[in-house]
Image: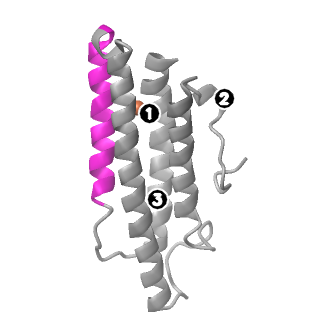
Amino acid sequence: MTAHSDHPCIPQELETGVAIIDEEHRRLREFIGRLRSICADFACKQDCTGCSAERIGACDAAFLDCMTELLGFMLDHFRHEEQLMKDLGISARQHERYQLHAEDHANIAGRLAGLTRPQPRAATVREIADTASHITRWLDNHIADHDLPMLH
Ligand SMILES: [Fe+2]
């Protein structure tokens, strides 16, 4: 399946084997697909030239809505994951690794929180594209580097 699918899959090598966590990772990918669906010409546009101010405003509003929902979902997911690691004794057994993991959660949440506030944008379409790419890279790296070694 592609990232644009309504029901994206998690690649098998990134499955933790914990059903609720894998489902939440899949939902995070759905949000990325939703970001990418905001602009129909997303892949080939370098800026918003050719779109009306009204259209750009609508894209900007859709971006802010999606980011706000994504951040809320992501924070809930981080809480679930960290609590699970505490309940399973992982946070105590692998204390340093658990701390780094929680820091990685806090860092991405802080960065995304800055994108949930209205602000002037040079090119809304690039902001959306860059954000979608950044979250995709972050999610795959985070799962591989942090979640999998502790949960798998
Ligand atoms: Fe995590």
Name which of mark 2 and mark 1 comes first in the sequence. Answer: 2
Residue 123 appears in the rendering: no
Q: Assess whether residue 90 is covered by the magenta stretch.
A: no
Circle 2: residue type? Gln
Residue 19 appears in the rendering: yes
Residue 89: x %, y % from top left: 34, 12
Q: Residue at x 40, y 39 (%)?
A: 77
Give the residue number, with chain letter if any, for mark 2: 12
Which tag is nearer the camera, tag 2 or tag 3? 2
Q: Residue at x 38, y 33 (%)?
A: 80
Q: Assess whether residue 104 is covered by the magenta stretch.
A: yes
**Which quadrant would residue 92 be assigned to in this image?**
top left
Give the residue number, with chain letter if any, for mark 1: 142
Circle 3: residue type? Asp
Above or below: residue 98 compared with residue 128: above
Q: Distance between the residues labelled 3 and 1?
A: 18 Å
Which residues make up the magenta segment? 93-114
Q: Residues within 10 Å of mark 3 (few under 14, many from 20)?
A: few
Q: Distance between the residues labelled 2 and 1?
A: 15 Å
Give the residue number, with chain letter if any, for mark 3: 130
Q: Does the residue labelled 3 lie within 8 Å of ligand 1?
A: no
